[in-house]
Image: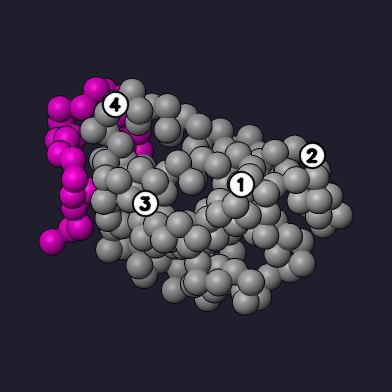
Amino acid sequence: MPQEPMTRFPVPDLDDLPADLRERIEEETDKAGFTPNVFMAYAYRPSHFRAFFAYYDALVSDTDLTREEIEMIIVAASGANDCYYCIVAHGALLRLFSDQPLLADQVASNYRNAEISDKHMAMLDVAVKLTERQAEIDETDFEKLRDAGFSERAIWDIGSVTAFFNLSNRMAHFADMRPNDEFHTMGR
């Protein structure tokens, strides 16, 4: 039996959703081979669905970061936030985009022990600091990212992805979003 998308709010029926949401969900289902639960969870509030996925799409398509870097940030921030949904779902994406089956588990549990470059360590140091101790972010963090080779736009993107997924992690906790079973085995 498939995992329920969330437990704390009602999950809408696909047939009852506005046409644009149905179309997006059907596209994602065709692409993945299953419907990622986050789509049905956010469909509870169609205007929130539209805003959430519009920003998500911008973050992954208009960026100076690689998709692997984006997923590393998401998994590290989600690990710091103990977000089960995002650790599992984006861990699967990190495995696929990096072609490294162990990387997602390393980044989620303790990125400091992961087998990553110094550049990516600097990126995750700042992302996790922004997640856990945002008031401590200062110019030294920006210098660290510049010294690692990130452009100003990429630095902005690191902050944007981190901030967005802190919001996403909190909503996933609040709604008790559950990852699809399929995510657990993808890219392994």
Do the residues under discs 1 and 3 have CB atoms within 8 angstroms? no
Q: Which residues are magenta?
A: 1-27
The quadrant in which the N terminus is found is bottom left
Circle 4 SS class:
helix
Separation of residues labelled 4 and 3 (CA atoms): 21 Å
Q: Reading the chain from its start, which is encountered first: label 2 or label 1?
A: 1
Q: Reading the chain from its start, which is encountered first: label 4 or label 2?
A: 4
Q: Residue at horizontal 18%, vertical 49%? A: 7
Q: Amino acid at mark 3?
A: Ala
Q: Which residue is mark 1?
A: 134
Q: Amino acid at mark 4?
A: Pro
Residue with the most extreme front position: 135
Nearer to us in this view, 37 or 166? 166
Q: Position of residue 64 (x, y in %)?
A: 71, 42
Q: Which residue is mark 3?
A: 32
Q: Which residue is mark 4?
A: 46
Q: Position of residue 164 (x, y in %)?
A: 51, 40
The quadrant in which the C terminus is found is bottom left
Separation of residues labelled 1 and 3 (CA atoms): 34 Å
